[in-house]
Image (cartoon, helix red, strand yellow):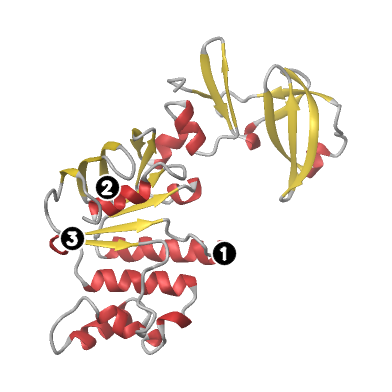
Amino acid sequence: MSFLAVDYRLQTPVHLHVEFEIRGFTALLGCSGAGKSSLLKALAGLLPATGTPWQNLPPEAREIGYLPQNAGLFPHLNVLENTAYPLRGAQRFVRAQNLLDALGLGELSSRPAGALSGGQAQRIALARALARGVKLLLLDEPGAGLDARTRVATLYWLLTTLEERNIPALAATHEPEVATMADWLVLLAGGKIIQQGTPREVFARPGSISAAELLGFENIWVEAGQAYAIRAADIALGSAGRAACITSLHPHGAGVRLECAGPQTFVVELAVEDAAALVPGAKVFLEFPAQKLRCLGSRM
């Protein structure tokens, strides 16, 4: 798996100092406004920054492909023309067509860029980046704006294509679901990297409250000076445990979602059959399975 160490400082439009690794398909997970997009632009040479690699190199000298959220295709050009845009020479359209064919996109060649669906546009944007011969791909919120089915299909297509060509990628996202697909996961908060590792490691052992929040844990609390986290679907109801009172109950997908008040407020997700007799005001006992409860290493 490809490996790249990054150490960058930005002063504007956000203040960041980040040190992390890119390993294969790497997800950069952070909340809105954390500076994910600014970091990608800095790596591409589109924002001023200092650090390694590529410091002082102009954008055209960096072997990087940058895919913004809107795919960035030229609407007045068709798919073939967009793909061939970074190429030079008399055979550029032949090379572009060969690449589209290899990616399973050849039938779209004559289609205007403005007539593409969101998923198709992202695939063509990747084809254009690959035509340039990039050594690293930067993806800003891949799959954003796509419906759930198209987003998953497009993301897995991106992953497969990059893996086949051994091209590393850094994908900025605020969605934990996208992070689960990565080879390597990097968490950004407070202007710095707060945790990195494989998705399995990071999701299993969030190192702080900030990390647990980014990873989508619905229940995070501090008790006796120690921070804990547990997912709503991992809390069980039993005959013993932490006493609480149901304050609200709402349908949630194929099940129900409870809000329960005790010394702390907890969100619980149950199957419908497990909640058939429950009503607001009912007293319940919440059980936290030891293998699902996360003891966080920091309160920050």
* Quadrant position of the C terminus in the picture: top left
Marks 2 and 1: which is nearer the front?
Answer: 1
N-terminal of the pair, mark 2 or mark 1, is 2
Q: Secondary structure at mark 1?
A: loop
Measuring from the top left, give residue 226's x and y in whole percent.
51, 14
Q: Can residue 293 be seen by looking at this rendering?
A: no
At numbered mark 2, what does the secondary structure look like: helix, strand or loop? strand
Q: Residues within 10 Å of mark 3 (few under 14, many from 20)?
A: some
Q: Dot 2 surroundings within 10 Å: few (below 14), some, or many (20 or more)?
A: many
The total of numbered circles placed on residues is 3
- Which of discs 1 and 3 lies nearer the camera? The answer is 3
Q: Earlier in the sequence, mark 1 or mark 3?
A: 3
| Residue corresponding to mark 3 | 59
The secondary structure type at the circle numbered 3 is: helix
| Residue at 37 percent of width and 60 percent of height | 159
User: Which amino acid is tagged 1?
Assistant: Asp
- State how far apart marks 2 and 1 are (Cα): 28 Å
Q: Are marks 2 and 1 in contact (CB under 8 Å)?
A: no
- Tell me which amino acid carries mark 2: Arg
Residue 173: x, y in percent?
43, 50
Q: Which one is in front, 96 or 181?
A: 96
Question: Which residue is found at the position 15% from the left and 44% from the top?
Answer: 52
Residue at label 1?
A: 147
**Left or right of 263 in this view: 162:** left
- Residue 1: where, in percent of width, then height? 24, 51
Tell me if mark 1 has few (under 14), some (14-19) or many (20+) residues whose alpha carbon lies within 10 angstroms of its own: few
Label pair 1/3, CB-CB below 8 angstroms:
no
The residue to which callout 2 is attached is: 23
**Residue 277, how many percent across, how many down?**
88, 35
Residue at 20%, 42% in the rendered image? 5
The CA distance from mark 1 to mark 3 is: 32 Å
